[in-house]
Amino acid sequence: MTTFYIEQFGCRATQADGAALERQLLRRGCISAQKASDADVVVVNTCTVTASADAQARDAIRKLHRANPNIRLIVTGCYAQRAPEELSQLPGVAWVVGNSHKPQIPELIERISPQCEASRSNRFVHLSSLSAAISSPCEPQAEILVGDIFEQQSLLTTPVLGGEGNHTRPTLKIQDGCNSRCSFCVIPFVRGKSRSLPPETVIRELQQLADAGYREIVLSGINLGNYGRDLSPQVEFRDLLRRILEETAVEHLRLSSIEPMDVTQDLIELFASTERLAKHFHMPLQSGSDRVLAAMYRWYRAEHYARRVELIREHLPHAAIGADAIAGFPGETEEDHAATLAFIESLSFTYLHVFSYSKRPGTKAAALANHLPGAVIKRRARELRALGERKAAAFRQSQAGRELRVLTLHPSGDSSNNRTPALSSNYLRLFVDGIFPANQWLDVKLAGCEGTFLTGRVSGLGL
Ligand code: SF4
């Protein structure tokens, strides 16, 4: 019986792919190994969002091979889709399988003979069928199985139970791919066009999670606002949310991230109408300079974004509002950077995720002439992060004395004696006095701040 291990990298979408793969392998009778060195086959599920994500994947592959040269390594995910030949040169790699062929990995694992040895030579099986590709599986060659990602119609997904919160808050990917072409972003080229999970499947998966006792579920996608536009008949994302509220017993639903222009008045009103939707919007901003937004091929300008933040605040004064910002996009001037800082300062963000611009081969931005020196990018990222921390601290302070319903989480390294970590609907992290089991609602009176955590006392047992 083949034993396998999946080494995970990347975002929630990639993690959902890994969870789906695990589910398929278990159904076929494969055995999940506790650690990579115990497995016959290790699947390395990569990310390629930045150059450092690529480097992490290469390091992991080298380490896995050093630890056990007999392991057969299958490298898949976004990096495998983008640069399969590069990965096929790494020691111990038996197969490089792009996102285009990810659903075929279980069949591949089942059919690879245990006697096969990986080698450094490679044979490109671009766009070929799997059966042709594995017709001579004992050849000592690293095979590449990558096709046109834009042909991919299927959507790999299974709830991801692990990760943050240690199984308390599973994530369900309901959408993959992206139809936009932001000039810095490699994602459409490695994940293909937007595909959505049919509403009936979303509802079934969510209900199963609710039946299993999960109270909060995170809905994720590469571009959640694109949800349903590929389905026939088309489905609006907010209508999917309404159906979920009506047809499932899910107690609390959170969105991972949504583009600002998809945060419409209707959607905000829906969120304001029920406690079952987390008061939390994560909207990628990327820049506060209109000149840079245009160069990024973003489809809004700063004033449009600001209006969405104000709309949320009008309806949900205590909501978490987070943003992504990119420091050092090619050609970004000091004035552009200052405009981004001033724009973020002017809005009631509650946290910020800052990314240093990273050149991604094949994107429009990579071909621009005016890339900035690394030191400038780093300094601007530092300034943005410092601003983000100040905004987050101000938000925490503003919540002192409020009474909130929170969900208890599994204790982590951050926990200490006689207190329990928890998360609020508006994405505040807390330590609650006393020991409580994970996955329980509590009403908590916020007392003070401790670093990036709030502290609170229980005022009642929630629900
Ligand atoms: S919306 Fe833009 S940044 Fe987001 S995944 Fe699509 S192309 Fe990339």
Image (cartoon, helix red, strand yellow):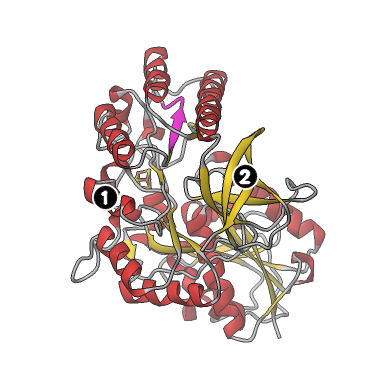
Give the CA separation, mark 1 to mark 2.
27 Å
Q: Amino acid at mark 1?
A: Glu
Q: Is residue 63 above or below residue 356?
A: below
Q: Which residues are magenta?
A: 321-329
| Tag of residue 280 | none
Q: In this view of the protein, can residue 129 be seen by the observer?
A: no
Q: Is residue 327 magenta?
A: yes
Residue designated by label 1: 269
Residue depicted at x 39% and y 18%? 342
Q: Is residue 263 above or below residue 97?
A: above
- Secondary structure type for disc 2: strand
Q: Main secondary structure of the magenta part?
A: strand
Left or right side of 117 for 133:
left
Q: Quadrant of ligand 1?
A: top left
Residue designated by label 2: 430
- Secondary structure type for disc 1: helix
Q: For the image shown, how many numbered marks are present on the structure?
A: 2
Q: Quadrant of the N terminus?
A: bottom right
